[in-house]
Amino acid sequence: MGPTDIETLISVGRPTVASDGSFAVFATSRPDISADRNVGQLWRIELPSGEPRRLTRGVADTSPRLSPDGGHVAFLRGDADGKAQIHVIEASGSEPVQVTDAPLGVGSFAWAPAGDVLAYTARVPESGRYGTIDGLAPEAESPRRITGIRWHANGVGYIADRPAHVFVVAAPDLGSEPSYETAPGPQTSSSTRARRVPEAARQLTSGSRSHDGVVFTADGTEILTTTDEIEHDRRDLRSPLVAVRVDGTGERVVLSATLSIADIAVAADGSIAFLASDPGPAGTDFVAPGVALWVLDGDQPRRLTDPDTIDLGEVGSHITAVGDDFLVQNRTRGEVHLLRVSRDGAIARLRRGLEVVGHGADAAGERIVCAVATNRSAGEILFLDAAGVDARLLTSFGDAASRAGFVLPRELEVTAPDGYPVHGWVATPPGDGPFPVLLQIHGGPYAAYGVHLFDETQVLVDAGYAVVYCNPRGSAGYGRAHGRSIRGRMGTDDFVDVLAFLDGAVAADERLDGDRVGIMGGSYGGYLTAWTIAHDHRFAAAIVERGFLDPTTFSGTSDIGSFFGDEYVGTDPTAIRAQSPMAVVDQVTTPTLVVHSELDFRCPLEQATRYYSALRRQGTASELVIFPGENHELTRSGRPRHRVERFEAILDWWGRQLPV
């Protein structure tokens, strides 16, 4: 798989299943280099064994949700300005009708139980900003007065002057007269937006608080959502759960801010379930947060899963109500398993014998449909019965990647010097070698490498390198204690584990050339790469990408700086320095390529430029590559051309520093 073969990586989003279980609808997405964006459409598949057919032909249609009666599909599509708006089509296929006209686009949305209303969240811009006045450029706007401890977010930008609020809008009558844009007239204001939708939306919330997620109560009279207020003094990750009345008469607190809530679901009997973690009495303990499934008994939360052994915190993890039970996703040892959890806490794993990473599920009756990734595909649809006995892949989107060519990594477990097991994988090119070796380190740190097809590894193997990668202490998927073990101790056990895994992989396969080794990683992986090359000088070269490199300046520049460093490296200056790559940069002699994105607010650009400048000043061979217009998510959702150019820069660096 070469750099341009990222076009073959077709991912599948969370499916939506008709209430009678007869069919499902899902969205695909893939990078398109010529369009320089991710493209994708909606698909429909008859159950239990139908062939998928394309339902829409938009450029980037996403997030389908079937109406309660299964007759219509609501989804997100960019409008003429590129902002995501709710559109609705017939479930059998029809011309889409645009339902919303939110100036900054729609976030989450949901159907009302009766199917007559859609609720959604959308950011509401302060007047005079973000295009609300035609011709007023961003640099001509008034200054922002910031009084809280947060002001920006990666991938969003400034947040205080555009809070997200809850809206409702009538579901469209697809048989009615189409809506037409309003033509300008003599009295039309230049700031008046032309109406593009059948019905005007109604805003239910206001003020400075933002709202995240919308879920209707069983009777349809209220909308459940969480709120987020920018703090004045110190960060608090706890989020209250509130119910907003659909008739606009107010809201009530369902659960006070005691937990950090990630997802909400309502069962048919009206019971409320949610995924949440306990950030402790200070409200900032997020290290290996222990996301669990909870239900509300009256006004009291009751936990159904054990956060020390079951991890429901995978990005995008959610709840699906199935009768009296709930489906959730547990990440473990590089996989994400679907679990069925009863109200009394009994747990059954539904799928066995197929290595997958689950990306979302929906169910109707005894039929369950999942979006998954496998070691041969970036995205497929998996069909399951409620007992988990019948499990079949219904799609073959991975065929495109197979034609491009890839290798299947080999699973390996190595014992660290202190006896701790380190789990990971080794991917090698075909042939007898010897192959130069690249040690990859993932971000997080509470994240994990997995069994799914991974372009980062495949491109390097295609270029002739053996790639070793593992989940050291601090990673997710091996119990909460494993994830919390490096809190206040970054660069200790994690450092030992990655080197032990590298040594073990080389010793286990004579084709790996242990004398010709490179190291690379992004985000936390950039941190551990920079830390490693300051303490171990075996590497021919290194790549430090979007790294967490200086905890001291991180606190005042990152969108998570108000709590991330405090929780991981502490607040004592001596302890911070003992865990800081910037504090030991003078020990680095390894040639280093520093890669970063211009609009990265998670690990801000100054982390890279200061580190690179220090390397250059002391005479260490180094180069810096900066991608304009990209943020922390470049490798996952950046412009396809930039993703290809990034791979080309990486291969060029290795070609010069560690030639095959």
Image (cartoon, grey):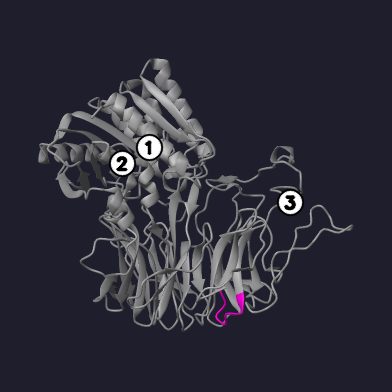
Coordinates of residue 60 in the picture (x, y in percent): 51, 57
* Residues at circles 2 and 1 in contact by the CB criterion of under 8 Å: yes
* Numbered mark located on residue 647 in the image: 1
Above-or-below relation of 104 to 615: below
Horizontal arrangement in the rendering, residue 382 relative to residue 280 (left or right): left
- Judge whether residue 543 is colored magenta: no
Coordinates of residue 610 in the picture (x, y in percent): 47, 26
Above-or-below relation of 88 to 610: below
Q: Residue furthest right?
A: 186
Q: Name the one closer to the observer, 56 or 88.
A: 56
Per the model, the C-alpha gap separating discs 1 and 3 is 38 Å
From which residue to which does the magenta span run?
111-117
* Numbered mark located on residue 459 in the image: 2
* Numbered mark located on residue 132 in the image: 3
Q: Amino acid at mark 1?
A: Phe
* Whether residue 299 is visible: yes
The local secondary structure at tag 1 comes to helix
Coordinates of residue 472 in the picture (x, y in percent): 26, 45
**Residue located at (25% from left, 43% from top):** 469
Horizontal arrangement in the rendering, residue 78 relative to residue 659 (left or right): right
* Residues at circles 2 and 3 in contact by the CB criterion of under 8 Å: no
Which numbered disc flags the more N-terminal residue, 2 or 3?
A: 3
**What's the magenta bit mostly, secondary-structure-wise?**
loop
Per the model, the C-alpha gap separating discs 2 and 1 is 8 Å
Q: Depth-wise, is mark 2 or mark 3 nearer the camera? A: 2
Q: Amino acid at mark 3?
A: Thr
The local secondary structure at tag 2 comes to helix
